[in-house]
Image (cartoon, rainbow, N blue to C red):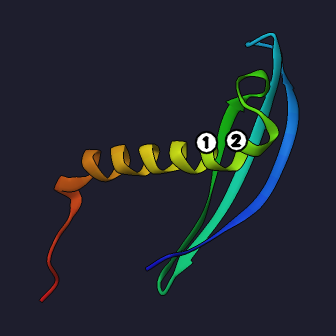
Amino acid sequence: MFDIQLESIERELDVELGGEVLEIEFEFSRTGCRGHARVSIEADSVTTTEIVPVAMSDLHLAFAALAEQTKAWRIEVS
């Protein structure tokens, strides 16, 4: 199991989108593996209480797609 922590939530201006985005960063770790993942959400698409749950859902979808895309990379070590 991974230990997953909410690292930060920042509001930033995104020139390409022409509005504000929320940058939600998660830190994750387990023995032999750790990292950070950032999720971007258009600020006006969520309420304050929805920010973290929506970011968690987006993070899940991203990692599920990443797991599927890298499935062929898995090897069994004897």
Q: Residue at x 83, y 15 (%)?
A: 19
How packed is label 1: few (under 14 Cα within 10 Å), some, or many (20 or more)? some
Secondary element type, mark 1: helix
Q: Residue 26 carries which label?
A: none
Q: Residue at x 70, y 23 (%)?
A: 45
Q: Position of residue 4 (x, y in %)?
A: 60, 70
Question: Dot 1 corresponds to which residue?
Answer: 54
* Residue 50, image quadrant: top right
Image quarter in which the N terminus is found: bottom left
- Give above or below for 77 relative to 40: below
- Give above or below for 13 relative to 19: below
- Give above or below for 66 relative to 33: above
Image quarter in which the C terminus is found: bottom left
How packed is label 2: few (under 14 Cα within 10 Å), some, or many (20 or more)? few
Q: Where is residue 34 in the image (x, y as percent from the top left)?
A: 56, 73
**In whole angstroms, how far apart are the C-alphas of marks 1 and 2?**
6 Å
* Residue 7, image quadrant: bottom right
Give the left or right position of residue 35, taking residue 9 as reference: left
Circles 1 and 2: CB distance less than 8 Å?
A: yes
Q: Where is residue 29 in the image (x, y as percent from the top left)?
A: 56, 76
- Give above or below for 46 relative to 4: above
Label 1 is placed on what type of residue? Val
Give the left or right position of residue 66, taking residue 78 as reference: right
Question: Dot 2 corresponds to which residue?
Answer: 50
* Residue 76, image quadrant: bottom left
Label 2 is placed on what type of residue? Glu
Secondary element type, mark 2: helix
